[in-house]
Image: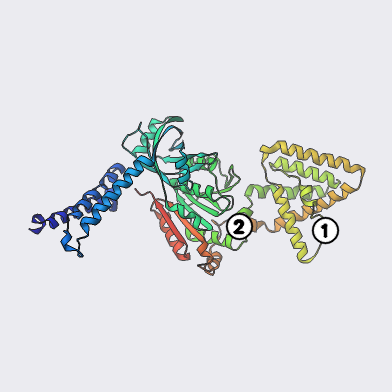
């Protein structure tokens, strides 16, 4: 009787019904999956009904046992209204010319945003987007990342995941320019990336977009390691081609799709900004992968920037074979160096100014032998040699210039012994560098996704959790599947802070 005859009873029933209306569709997966995004979003506005009911639930006279409700809940509604008005009038803008790049499974949107938007969204974040030519009432959230070629532009990637994105793809049959409304930007858990010296960015599918912002933002100041599980070949190839990956961290893409990639069976790709991206055709094993990443960097033995790609490995091995072959021929050192430069060109790499790199200021030191000095000398030779073999066939104009310079020096050497002796010393240094590199072949080929984690797990557990592991942080963006579950377990095991951004909506 009290439920229907008293103010507290009626308002209490309204609150209970409101909570069920809001909570059940989001908490019960069979029902949630059958209700569209817009409907679930609208249902959340029942919190206004809940707050109004709570404001009448108890009178002031019940203070301190509930009389605060008539003050607290109207304040919350007013606060929400003021915030909504501020966002509408000061954080919403129209982009008259937005560029849409259409892919088979998604759309990339590029927009030139205002100075206000640029200053707030320098670290990424997310925004709400409305396309009035699709629906004037629907706003959808997307993660932002900066256009690498134009800092005045922000980009989002719309993956075909629901009715609205399907409508967008159907309306855009080719690349085009159309108006759009954007609201934001708003902060995301990825904004905490700056708090870690070493970052482990884990992404599932379209969750790669905030990780791209972090890698670009902290390219020179942090070591960002990417673990991206992706099954869509078009999205994978698009971001490998256009995104800016970290040059100081591990970039690992775990491709789980069935469709063949346009890059074929390649396991490594060098991006436009010079980063090495590893493509692994398997699912990521985070319990082994995360300790291997930490071990490779904290031990200093297998840092990502020292990784030698399989293509470069093969080229250096072939150079070694060519070097042995030239040793059997009756050629001068100058002629051998010229042959080696030309052969490197045929392999698709530059042998850039190798003689000057090795015979320079360290020339005298290269002749030392024995003990630790010899080991240091060989390491220097190896580093110099690997640094010289670094560019692809697209730079053939440079190759021609270097080759011509080498030929001219070889010709001039016929008239005197000075250059001939320097070329002989250079040739010996090349041999020493090659041998040193081949000795360390396995070390340069360290792959965290393949290595057994028993040694690395023991090493990581021995590190100080506050002073060392405290400098590591993990960030996740994706669905709430096995990838997220395994990441939670792995970070908890090693005491690493984890920030998660889920798009389960």
Q: Residues within 10 Å of mark 1 (few under 14, many from 20)?
A: few
Would you place residue 64 above or below residue 110 in this image? below
- What is the x, y in percent for residue 149? 55, 39
Quick one: label 1 or label 2, which is nearer the N terminus?
2
Here the colouring is: rainbow
Residue 399: image tag: none
Q: Quadrant of residue 10?
A: bottom left
SS label for mark 2 = loop
Q: Quadrant of residue 396?
A: top right
The N terminus lies in quadrant:
bottom left
SS label for mark 1 = helix
Residue at 20 percent across and 54 percent down: it is 55
- What is the x, y in percent for residue 326? 80, 47
Residue at 17 percent across and 59 percent down: it is 60
User: Total of numbered circles in the picture?
Assistant: 2
Residue 303: image tag: 2
- What is the x, y in percent for residue 422? 85, 50
Would you place residue 473 above or below residue 350 in this image? below
Q: Nearer the viewer, residue 479 or 182?
A: 182
Residue 264 visible in the shown view: yes
Q: Nearer the viewer, residue 353 or 318?
A: 353
Q: Which residue is mark 1?
A: 367
- What is the x, y in percent for residue 398? 72, 38
What distance separates the C-alpha of mark 1 from that of mark 2? 29 Å
Q: Is the C-beta separation of discs 1 and 2 under 8 Å?
A: no
């Amino acid at each position: 009787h009290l439920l229907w005859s008293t103010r507290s009873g009626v308002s209490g029933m309204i609150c209970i019904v409101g909570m069920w209306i809001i909570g059940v569709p989001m908490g019960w997966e069979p029902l949630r999956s059958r209700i569209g995004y817009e409907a679930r979003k609208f249902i959340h506005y029942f919190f206004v009904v809940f707050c109004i009911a709570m404001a009448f639930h108890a009178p002031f006279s019940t203070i301190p046992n509930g009389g605060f409700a008539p003050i607290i809940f109207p304040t919350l509604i007013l606060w929400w209204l003021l915030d909504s008005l501020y966002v509408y009038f000061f954080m919403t803008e129209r982009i008259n010319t937005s560029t849409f790049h259409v892919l088979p499974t998604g759309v990339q949107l590029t927009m030139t945003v205002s100075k206000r938007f640029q200053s707030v969204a320098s670290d990424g974040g997310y925004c709400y987007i409305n396309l009035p030519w699709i629906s004037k009432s629907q706003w959808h959230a997307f993660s932002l990342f900066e256009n690498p070629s134009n800092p005045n532009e922000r980009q989002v990637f719309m993956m075909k995941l629901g009715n609205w994105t399907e409508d967008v793809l159907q309306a855009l049959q080719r690349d085009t320019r159309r108006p759009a409304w954007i609201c934001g930007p708003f902060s995301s858990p990825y904004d905490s990336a700056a708090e870690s010296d070493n970052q482990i960015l884990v992404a599932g599918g379209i969750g790669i977009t905030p990780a791209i912002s972090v890698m670009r933002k902290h390219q020179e100041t942090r070591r960002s390691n990417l673990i991206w599980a992706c099954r869509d070949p078009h999205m994978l190839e698009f971001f490998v081609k256009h995104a800016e990956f970290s040059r100081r961290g591990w970039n690992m893409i775990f491709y789980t799709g069935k469709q063949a990639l346009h890059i074929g069976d390649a396991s490594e790709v060098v991006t436009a900004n010079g980063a090495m991206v590893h493509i692994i055709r398997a699912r990521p094993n985070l319990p082994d992968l995360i300790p291997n990443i930490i071990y490779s960097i904290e031990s200093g033995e297998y840092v990502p920037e020292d990784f030698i790609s399989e293509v470069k490995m093969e080229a250096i091995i072939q150079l070694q074979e060519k070097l042995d072959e030239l040793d059997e021929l009756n050629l001068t050192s100058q002629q051998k160096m010229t042959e080696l430069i030309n052969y490197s060109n045929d392999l698709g790499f530059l042998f850039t100014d190798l003689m000057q790199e090795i015979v320079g200021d360290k020339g005298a030191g290269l002749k030392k032998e024995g003990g630790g000095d010899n080991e240091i000398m060989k390491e220097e030779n190896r580093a110099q040699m690997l640094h010289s073999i670094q560019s692809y066939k697209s730079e053939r104009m440079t190759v021609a210039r270097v080759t011509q310079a080498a030929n001219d020096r070889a010709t001039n050497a016929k008239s005197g012994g000075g250059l001939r002796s320097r070329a002989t010393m250079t040739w010996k240094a090349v041999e020493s560098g090659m041998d040193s590199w081949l000795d360390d072949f396995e070390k340069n080929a360290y792959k965290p996704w393949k290595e057994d984690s028993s040694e690395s797990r023991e090493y990581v557990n021995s590190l100080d959790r506050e002073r060392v592991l405290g400098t590591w942080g993990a960030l996740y963006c994706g669905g709430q599947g096995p990838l997220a579950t395994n990441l939670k377990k792995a970070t908890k095991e090693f005491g690493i802070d984890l920030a998660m951004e889920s798009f389960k909506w």
